[in-house]
C-alpha cells in the first residue's frame, strides 16, 4: 500500500513527476512483482497436496 500511495502521489494524477502512461506502466510492473512474491511465499498444507494429487478427502 505504501508503494502505491507513493506512486499515486508522484504520478500523473498527483504531483505529476511521472507522466502518463509511465505511471500506469510502473503500477502494472509493481503489481506483477508483488503478486509473484506473494505466490512464492505461499506454502502447501496437507489438504492442498491432497487436492493436487486428486485424493480429495471424504467428507
Image (spheres, rainbow, N blue to C red):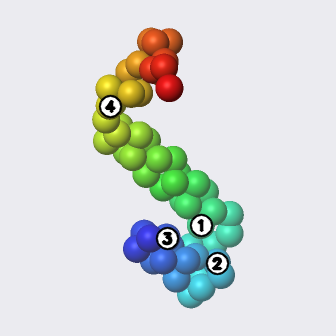
SS state under label 2: loop
For this rendering, which residue is in front, 49 or 42? Answer: 49
Residue 32 position in % (x across, y down): 51, 47
Marks 1,2: beta carbons within 8 A: yes
Residue that extends furthest to the bottom in the rendered view of this protein: 15
Marks 1,4: beta carbons within 8 A: no
Q: Which residue is mark 2?
A: 12
Residue positioned 63% across, 62% down in the render: 24
Q: Which residue is mark 1?
A: 23
Residue positioned 50% across, 26% down in the render: 59
Please name which of the two marks, 3 or 2, marks the residue nearer to the observer.
3
Earlier residue among tags 4 and 2: 2
Question: Is residue 8 among what the camera can see?
Answer: yes
Question: Is residue 17 among what the camera can see?
Answer: no
* Inter-mark Cα distance, 1 to 4: 38 Å
Please name which of the two marks, 4 or 2, marks the residue nearer to the observer.
4
Is 37 situated left or right of 19 in this image?
A: left
Amino acid at each position: 500500500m505504501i508503494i502505491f500511495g507513493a506512486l499515486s502521489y508522484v504520478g500523473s494524477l498527483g504531483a505529476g513527476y511521472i507522466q502518463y502512461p509511465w505511471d500506469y506502466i510502473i503500477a502494472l510492473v509493481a503489481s506483477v512483482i508483488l503478486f509473484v512474491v506473494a505466490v512464492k511465499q505461499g506454502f502447501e498444507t496437507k489438504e492442498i497436496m491432497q487436492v493436487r494429487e486428486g485424493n480429495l478427502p471424504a467428507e
